[in-house]
Amino acid sequence: MHWRYRDTVLTLCTVALFVTMVGRLAISPVVPDIAAEFEISNTLIGLALTGMWVAYALAQFPSGVLADRFGERLVILASVGGTGLTALVIVAAPTFGVFVLGTVLLGAVAGLHYSVATALLTRIYDDIGTAIGLHNAGAPIAGLVTPIVVSQVAVSYGWRPAVAVAAALALPLFVLITRGIRPTEPRRPDQPMRERLELAPILELLSRPPIVFTGVIAVISDFTWQAMASFLPTFFVQYHDYSRTLAGALFAAYFVAQGVLQVGVGVLADRIGRDVTTAICMVAGIAGLSLLVAGPRAGAVAAPDFGSGSAFELGAVGAGIVLLGLSMGWSAAVFPRFMDHLSAAEQSSGFGLIRTVYMVVAASGSVVVGLLADLFGWAVSFGFLIALLAVVCVLLAVNEAFGLGY
């Protein structure tokens, strides 16, 4: 196969997603260090991370409007460059208040990328499930690299240089995108942006039954994803009593599983259907979280050779991570479901609007899971996520059984 321009676009968009995800994930492995320095609780850290995800969500609709007016390339460049700059704000934060401000700004600029890049790829690819799956792989690849690199840098130099890794990656990528992606033709260059914010068309799109139904699935799935992205390493440290290094390695393994399996999720969505594939993801998530919570824990089995856990325990945890990684590849099946119900003219700003709505709701995943962990422990906190994934399974089963057509 010969290399085509659209392959360059897909590659650079994937790397851009990787870098913006590094910026957001770099905080999770060093949560204990940040909490110790600023003398705050898991709940307050969760609140800061929720602020980041809310800002990320709120940026989705404006990003689509901006892309329609100025072209996708310019918006993607703004996202990559802004990620680097806001990472530096977090690194230099003298107080927790400034840290929160930096995380919120980081979420806002990072949020400019995804909806715009997805719409651009939808425009140039026919098998959009596969293309979206490959593009989405940038996030779990970031999940592989980020916890390992950030944990090692934090151990040697502290959490601030560790978070600065995102800024070091953003600048060269900015240059590559400038040279590699051609200026894109805006879809609506002359339409006043004020018209795009009129309430009636927004409500009409959001009230379509298939969009509402898919949106509920996306809210629950993304709520769970954000909880994992924020607290999975902390869960391994506090619940399983693992070292921070091992917790970071397991966090990386989770993202490896997600990255590899997510491409397969996209292919399955194109071949056997969006809903069947989504159901497979939900069942895998229920099984994976159950293994992590109810499986053997550190100290339950003597493990002199492993230090932080026995071979049996780590095997159960490993299986749970693989299943959870498969589950969190849900977007490669759910996002094409949204696109199936949007016209070509709606796919940029419309998809951005949808992402803004469902992600604002789902952004509470960080603070809710952190609060439940503080009040009742990690078993209850993760058990709540299991119940939510079961709700999605019920919704899909009812839609199919009664032929609702949602």
Image (cartoon, grey):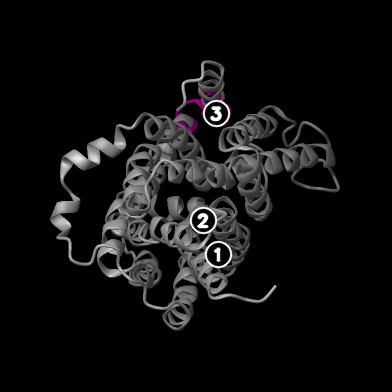
Q: Using the image, tell me which numbered label, if any, was put on residue 389.
A: 3
**Left or right: 297 with respect to 228?**
right
Write the start and end of the magenta stretch as one range: 373-391
At x 48%, y 64%, the residue is: 124
Q: Is residue 51 something one can see in this rendering?
A: no
**Left or right: 152 with respect to 61?**
right
Q: CA distance from mark 2 to mark 1?
A: 7 Å
Question: Toward which corner of the image does residue 29 lie, by quadrant?
Answer: bottom right
> Which residue lies under the disc numbered 2?
30
Give whichever of discs 2 and 1 has the lower sequence position.
2
What x and y, as percent, mark residue 204? 25, 36
Residue density around tag 1, few if under 14, some if 14–19, many if 20 or more, within 10 Å: some
> Which residue lies under the disc numbered 1?
154
**Left or right: 185 with respect to 272?**
left
| Amino acid of disc 3 | Leu
Give whichever of discs 3 and 1 has the lower sequence position.
1
